[in-house]
Image (cartoon, rainbow, N blue to C red):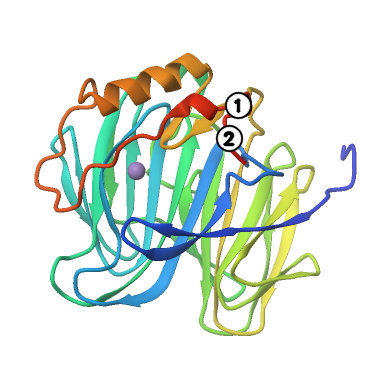
Amino acid sequence: MQQQSPRSERLEARRTLLGDGLEIRRALPHRHRRTVGAWCFLDHAGPADYAAGRGVNVGPHPHIGLQTFSWMIEGAIQHRDSLGYEQWIRPGQVNLMTAGRGISHSEESPAGEPGRVQLAQLWIALPEAEADREPAFEHYPELPVVERGGFSVTVLAGEFTGERAPAKVYSPLLGLDLATPGEARATLPLRPDFEYAAMVLEGAADFDGATLEPGSLLYLGSGRDGLPVASSRAARLLLIGGEPLREEILIWWNFVARRREDIVQATHDWNLGLRFGEVQGARSARLTAPDPGELNLRGSRE
Ligand code: MN
């Protein structure tokens, strides 16, 4: 039984710069919506052409308490991490890095040549019981794709119409990429116990009457068993969802934790070169963690 009418809320993504100057749209965390299920961070980079030596160039930096989930749409990025993994990610592929108690990595576009890039990078908060697990890295070169009403639906995370994504996640989640070269219309089956949000990456799409274009996130709430999606032209969009997080998390710089002292400790350890290992071979400079002195109870300076 549906307890209340589903509500939707449009949230503007923040424009910010990634690494050495690529403009991105950051939809999560948002002042009015910090998480959607366990998804706690959502950046959309590009689509953009860049000059030789530019692109995505993020030097070594640490993570704790989360998984980084990179969905590559155009171009290529090289991942390197402190476990020794060195992995190119290309269109249609996912890199999933489980930070657990601590890992560091870098992400860089091909050196010395101009290029084009588009990707979505998301974080998934690990549940408290898994937050200190061993770090891990996985590359998924192929994902399930299903056709629905003219949309090509790639199952990024979780399960959709019987197709299960390979990504190893630790809470009930869904991530879908929907792409169409033209007119398309479908009703996506949803779970009433999940909350959802949609973001258009290219073109435009209508969700249950609301038209969405790149630059904002449409929070769809929970209590829905289906979502009508339509597009009259070429479009690409993301749908994310999951069981609402029942716990308060702190999101600070590249860290997710429950306790302020864990963030202070991680900052201290990283800036002193402890605990997070070494990333070999990165061209971009190692990042320095900012002082968490002004970290408030919500884990945000906003
Ligand atoms: Mn990272």
Please determine whether, in this image, residue 286 is positioned above or below residue 153: above
Residue 49 occupies quadrant: bottom left
Toward which corner of the image does residue 241 lie, by quadrant? top right
Residue 258 lies, with reference to residue 239, above or below; the image says above
Residue behind label 1 places its C-beta within 8 angstroms of ligand 1: no
Q: Are marks 1 and 2 in contact (CB under 8 Å)?
A: yes
x, y (%) of residue 225? Answer: 75, 49
Q: Which residue is denoted by mark 1 in the rendering?
A: 296
Q: Is residue 94 left or right of residue 9?
A: left
On screen, residue 264 versus residue 192, left or right, reads left
Numbered disc 2: secondary structure: loop
Image quadrant where one finds the N terminus: top right
Q: Residue at x 75, y 46 (%)?
A: 221
Q: Residue at x 32, y 57 (%)?
A: 93
Q: Ligand 1 appears in which quadrant?
A: top left
Residue plotted at (31% across, 60% down) = 20
| Residue type pointed to by label 2 | Ser
Q: On the rendered structure, is 177 left or right of 225? A: left
Amino acid tagged 1: Asn
Q: Nearer the viewer, residue 227 or 300?
A: 300
- Secondary structure category for the residue under label 1: loop
- Above or below, 155 relative to 295: below
Disc 1/disc 2 C-alpha distance (Å): 6 Å
**Circle number at residue 280:** none
Q: Is residue 175 visible?
A: yes
Quarter of image, res 97: top left
Residue 300, labelled with which disc?
Answer: 2
214 in relation to 297, above or below: below
Q: Residue 102: horizontal and vertical position, in percent?
A: 31, 25
Q: Residue furthest left?
A: 281
Give neighbour class at mark 1: few <14, some 14-19, many 20+ (Cα, 10 Å). Answer: few
